[in-house]
Amino acid sequence: MASSKINDRQALTIELAGSEYGIGANSIKEIARMVETTPVPEAPSFVVGAIDYRGQLVVVVDLAARLSLGKATADITSYIVIVDCGDRRAGLLIDNVLDVINLDADAIMGVPANLPLPEALVAGAYEENEHLLLLLDVAPIIDIADTDLLKKLKKAKRVKS
């Protein structure tokens, strides 16, 4: 049974807190090494900060913290996956990039019961070679990376100047 939330034919597989997850390839703009971030005032604890991405301020979300899996280590071995969802853009801090896989629509399932992470952040599951890969739903994950946070950051920068 295919999940209606997943329209991608490919997924980027990533490592996060010792486990493997998938992100639909259609939402990914770029994969970059971790860079210095600027703190965002009044941001939730899973927001690492903001970066300048090609002249645009982008909020970086600690994906492990967002999924309630602990905190990621933000160092030179970490990656930021820049994702878009509609008119929203954010960076996802992850531990490692693993692979890009082709998705067989018949092997995509709905969200499994008894997930170890927030169900609203999972689009579905993909079974490949007797391995179940959770496919993450980018929209609710980056929902917090809204313009209000960026406005607060811009305002704080003006006050400091």
Image (tube, rainbow, N blue to C red):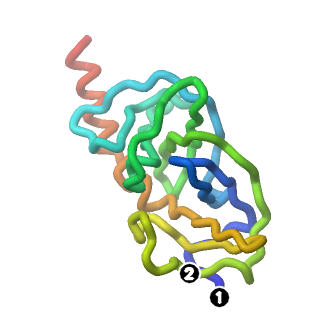
Residue at image location 64% in from the left, 45% down from the top: 29
Could you tell whether 12 is left or right of 49 in the image?
A: right
Q: CA distance from mark 1 to mark 2?
A: 7 Å
- 140 or 93: nearer the viewer: 93
Label disc, if present, on residue 58 of the rendered structure: none
Against 126, residue 42 (above or below) is above
Residue at image location 54% in from the left, 31% down from the top: 53
Q: Closer to the N terminus: mark 1 or mark 2?
A: 1
Q: Position of residue 130 (x, y in %)?
A: 73, 74
Q: Position of residue 132 (x, y in %)?
A: 64, 70
Residue at image location 74% in from the left, 62% down from the top: 10
Quarter of the image where one finds residue 159: top left
Could you tell whether 114 is left or right of 107 in the image?
A: left
For the residues bearing labels 1 and 2, Cβ distance under 8 angstroms:
yes
Quarter of the image where one finds residue 160: top left
Q: Position of residue 135 (x, y in %)?
A: 59, 65
Quarter of the image where one finds residue 41: top left
Question: Mark 2 sits on what residue?
Answer: 110
Question: Mark 1 sits on what residue?
Answer: 1
How many numbered discs, if any? 2
At label 1, which amino acid type do we have? Met
Q: Quadrant of the N terminus?
A: bottom right
Q: Residues within 10 Å of mark 1 (few under 14, many from 20)?
A: few
